[in-house]
Amino acid sequence: MIIRRFRPADENAVYDVCLRTGADGHDATRLFADPRMLGHAYAGAYLRLQSQFAFVLDDTDTDTDTDSNSHDSSGSEVVGYVLGALDTHEFERRCEREWWPALRSRYPDPGDVPAAERTPDQRIAHLFYHPAAAAQALLDGYPSHLHIDLLPRAQGKGFGRELMELLLTELAAAGSPGVHLGVSETNTGAIAFYRRLGFEHLADAPYTAIMGRTLAG
Ligand SMILES: CC(C)(COP(=O)(O)OP(=O)(O)OC[C@H]1O[C@@H](n2cnc3c(N)ncnc32)[C@H](O)[C@@H]1OP(=O)(O)O)[C@@H](O)C(=O)NCCC(=O)NCCS
């Protein structure tokens, strides 16, 4: 497996990894009627607006003559990614102008459905209309943020650490003093991983722990 920069042709594969790790780190495929909902909310904008901070783990098949249909014609298969936004505040502003409007025109606002009765698809569609905004106090010290997901067969082999170190180096080189992330408070494996990489608990949001790490200048 190799780590490389994201290419536009990887977009569907990144969306797929997002779905297949979207239920507290486990496969969320059966939860969603529309398989692209999670990718729209948690991956697409990074690929379109911040692709210089998007890296993928590619399980390159050097023997492209095999019968495998899980690789594309170049023998490439994305099995993980890390996606970053350098300046969260600016990223949120750009999403408001350049990302959410197209989704709002395709997916109705489920605002009139009581929150407890929304389907998983509707809960994500609600985010398109009411995206989370990071608190200014958090952004003062940790203006960047990230998402990382690896398919099960790529986990536990050091690739998560490698992807994170690559992104953190790039964010630091671009001048960021710190990075934060949100993780489901029940995703204990991911929380242990982030702690191992030097992240500390900073705050709590609904069902979510906010963790952060300063970056060496
Ligand atoms: C969480 C995730 C990104 C970690 O990546 P990974 O490649 O499996 O982790 P690595 O093998 O690079 O491990 C790096 C370090 O974290 C530790 N670690 C990783 N997963 C751990 C776990 N579940 N429990 C305890 N420690 C863990 C490793 O022991 C390792 O320590 P070391 O480098 O000091 O020896 C990956 O497992 C994953 O994508 N999981 C599913 C999706 C997910 O939960 N994403 C996060 C959503 S917020």
Image (cartoon, rainbow, N blue to C red):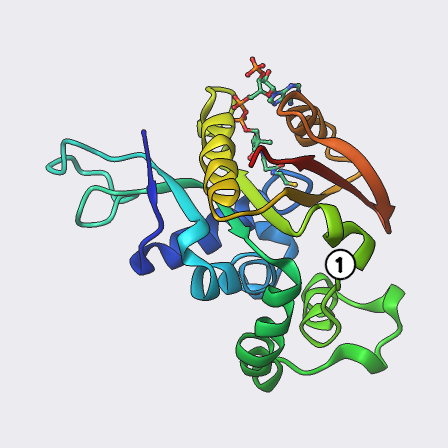
Tell how many labels.
1
Q: Is residue 83 left or right of residue 211?
A: left
- Residue in the picture at 45% in, 42% down: 170
- Residue in the picture at 55% in, 37% down: 217
State which image quarter holds ligand 1.
top right
Q: Which residue is mark 1?
A: 134
* Residue 113: % across, % down: 84, 77
Q: Quadrant of residue 118?
A: bottom right
Q: Looking at the picture, tell me which residue is in the foreground, 52 or 38.
A: 52
Tell me if the residue at label 1 has its CB under 8 Å from ligand 1.
no
Q: Looking at the picture, tell me which residue is in the foreground, 81 or 202.
A: 202
Residue 1 can be seen in this image: yes
Circle 1 sits in a helix, a strand or a loop, which is it?
A: loop
Q: Quadrant of residue 162?
A: top left
Q: Looking at the picture, tell me which residue is in the foreground, 127 or 210.
A: 210
Q: Residue furthest bottom?
A: 105
Quarter occupied by the N terminus: top left
Q: Residues within 10 Å of mark 1 (few under 14, many from 20)?
A: some
Q: Is residue 45 above or below residue 164?
A: below
Q: Is residue 124 above or below residue 14?
A: below
* Residue 210: % across, % down: 77, 43
* Residue 94: % across, % down: 57, 73
* Residue 182: % across, % down: 72, 46
Q: Residue furthest left?
A: 65
Q: Looking at the picture, tell me which residue is in the foreground, 162 or 59.
A: 162
Residue 135 can be seen in this image: no
Q: Is residue 96 left or right of residue 183?
A: left
- Residue in the picture at 40% in, 54% down: 52
The amino acid beneath tag 1 is: Ala
- Residue in the picture at 15% in, 35% down: 66
